[in-house]
Amino acid sequence: MSWLDRAEQLGAQDDLDGQFILLWIAFNAAYATEIDERYRSSAQVTSRAFLRRLVELDAPKRRIEGLVWAEFTKSIRVLLDNPYVFKPFWDFQTGVMDEAEWKRKFAAAKSAAHRALGRLNTVTVLGIVLARIYVLRNQLIHGGATWKSGINRDQLRDCTNFMAKLVPLVIEIMMDHPQVHWGPACYPVVK
């Protein structure tokens, strides 16, 4: 909650880059648990299970559905069409794959996302959106973008706005369900 609090303070100070980074830390702190090394490569499966549990617990109030289907539908569609937050695009830029391959993957990913949108599959859509936001996170955290850059403002603004609504909701759902075991903490406080 401290990371969320600081992110909200930066939002009031118009520091979009810092706010986004702190929102990601707050989100990561909410879902991160210690993962057995044998399953480390399946972190996406772990996050998908976390999202599924959140949506199930939120079913009576449908706040996450409202976020995805009412409040951010347009932003989500724009994000899905944006190659700059799609990992294979960057793999093409660095020579890891050819242009035809990244474009094929982009078309397939958009098709899968649109199927999930058409089926109102909240967990899948949320997973896809967070995977795209993760690419933006990597751009910032790994120094691929400059602070207050002029080239990524639209996606950063949309992703920050989405995370600024999602993260408090995630924390609220978790706090509403203290009986749920969310898994062991990665770095528990020790003395």
Image (cartoon, rainbow, N blue to C red):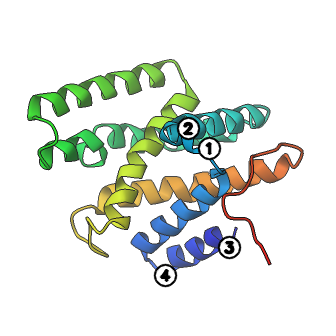
Q: Residue at x 35, y 43 (%)?
A: 79
* Residue 70 visible, this orientation: no
Dot 4 alpha-carbon crowd within 10 angstroms: few under 14, some 14 to 19, many 20 or more: few
Dot 3 alpha-carbon crowd within 10 angstroms: few under 14, some 14 to 19, many 20 or more: few
Query: To which residue does mark 4 refer?
Result: 13
How far is disc 4 from disc 2 in space, using C-alphas? Answer: 40 Å
Do the residues bearing badges 4 and 1 touch, measured as CB atoms within 8 Å?
no
Q: Secondary structure at mark 1?
A: loop
Query: To which residue does mark 2 refer?
Result: 39
Question: Which of the two marks, 4 or 2, is nearer to us in this view?
Answer: 2
State the image quarter where residue 81 is shown.
top left
How far is disc 4 from disc 1 in space, using C-alphas? Answer: 39 Å
How far is disc 2 from disc 1 in space, using C-alphas? Answer: 5 Å
Which numbered disc flags the more N-terminal residue, 3 or 4? 3
Question: Which of the two marks, 4 or 1, is nearer to us in this view?
Answer: 1
Query: To which residue does mark 3 refer?
Result: 2
Q: Point out residue 134 in the picture as x, y percentages from the top left corner.
A: 42, 51
